[in-house]
């Protein structure tokens, strides 16, 4: 996602610099986080990017709009910078999948589904042995507290609808 945004910003500044507001860079110091942790400018920037992609790549524009709200979830929560940096990437997932691919790449004759599950499970276990602590692991309690709070609010909302 960062690559797409960077590519758009580069195009926006170099090929169409007259369209930037106030002739300032699109991604400059425009990140504004409100008192409740709401991201204001970044969502507008992604919406601009989706508009730009609409004509040539409508499915890409639709994908951007579909995940727009979820894209800034960790920023809204107000997590500490170290934890945001770690959770804001797909590195956790990508490195795990890379490890599984490395351990299963030579298997060419999968007997059945249970064999694939056994191998995948063993590969995930072996990959997990090489994991390091995530940056900001001391602040994970903040994430847990937020998740617990939002789960409680959802339960209350469900009870109000039922009752």
Image (cartoon, rainbow, N blue to C red):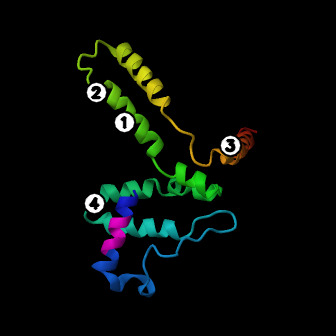
- Local packing at callout 1 (Cα closer than 10 Å; few below 14, some 14-19, many 20+) is few
Mark 2 or mark 3, earlier in chain = 2
Q: Earlier in the sequence, mark 3 or mark 4?
A: 4
| Magenta stretch, overall SS | helix
- In space, the residues marked 2 and 4 are separated at their CA atoms by 34 Å
Taking 88 as reference, is 52 left or right? left
Nearest the viewer among 157 and 20 is 20
Mark earlier in primary sequence (2, 4): 4
The magenta segment is 6-11
Q: Decide if residue 75 is in sight here.
A: yes
> Could you tell me which secondary element the residue under label 1 belongs to?
helix
Residue 7, image x, y percentages: 32, 66
Q: Position of residue 6 (x, y in %)?
A: 37, 66
Q: Is residue 119 above or below residue 143?
A: above
C-alpha span from label 1 to label 4: 29 Å
Using residue 17 as the reference point, say whether residue 158 is left or right of it: right
Q: Is residue 100 above or below residue 67?
A: above
User: Mark 1 and 3 residues: CB-CB less than 8 Å, in contact?
Assistant: no
Q: Is residue 143 visible?
A: no
Q: Residues within 10 Å of mark 3 (few under 14, many from 20)?
A: few
Q: Quote the CA–CA distance across marks 1 and 2.
A: 10 Å
Which label sits on residue 144?
3
Q: Which residue is mark 2?
A: 105
Q: Residue at x 32, y 24 (%)?
A: 104
> Is the N terminus in the top left, top right, bottom left or bottom right quadrant?
bottom left
Q: Nearer the viewer, mark 2 or mark 3?
A: 2
Residue found 38% across the figure and 13% down from its top:
114
Query: How far is the residue under mark 1 from the one under mark 3?
Result: 27 Å
As measured in the structure, the alpha-carbon distance from the residue carrying label 3 to the one carrying label 4 is 38 Å
| Residue matched to label 4 | 57
Residue 155 in the image: state x and y as whole percent. 71, 40
């Amino acid at each position: 996602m960062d690559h797409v945004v960077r590519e758009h910003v580069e195009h926006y500044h170099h090929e169409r610099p007259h369209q930037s507001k106030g002739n300032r860079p699109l991604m400059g110091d425009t990140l504004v986080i409100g008192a409740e942790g709401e991201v204001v400018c970044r969502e507008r920037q992604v919406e601009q990017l989706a508009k730009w992609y609409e004509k040539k790549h409508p499915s890409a524009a639709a994908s951007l709009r579909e995940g727009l709200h979820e894209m800034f979830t960790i920023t809204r929560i107000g997590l500490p910078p170290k934890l945001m940096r770690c959770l804001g990437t797909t590195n956790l997932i990508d490195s795990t999948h890379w490890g599984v691919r490395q351990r299963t790449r030579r298997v060419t004759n999968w007997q059945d589904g249970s064999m694939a599950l056994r191998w995948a499970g063993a590969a995930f276990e072996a990959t997990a042995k090489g994991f390091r602590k995530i940056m900001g692991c001391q602040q994970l309690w903040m994430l847990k507290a937020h998740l617990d709070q939002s789960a409680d609010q959802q339960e209350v909302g469900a009870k109000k609808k039922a009752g």
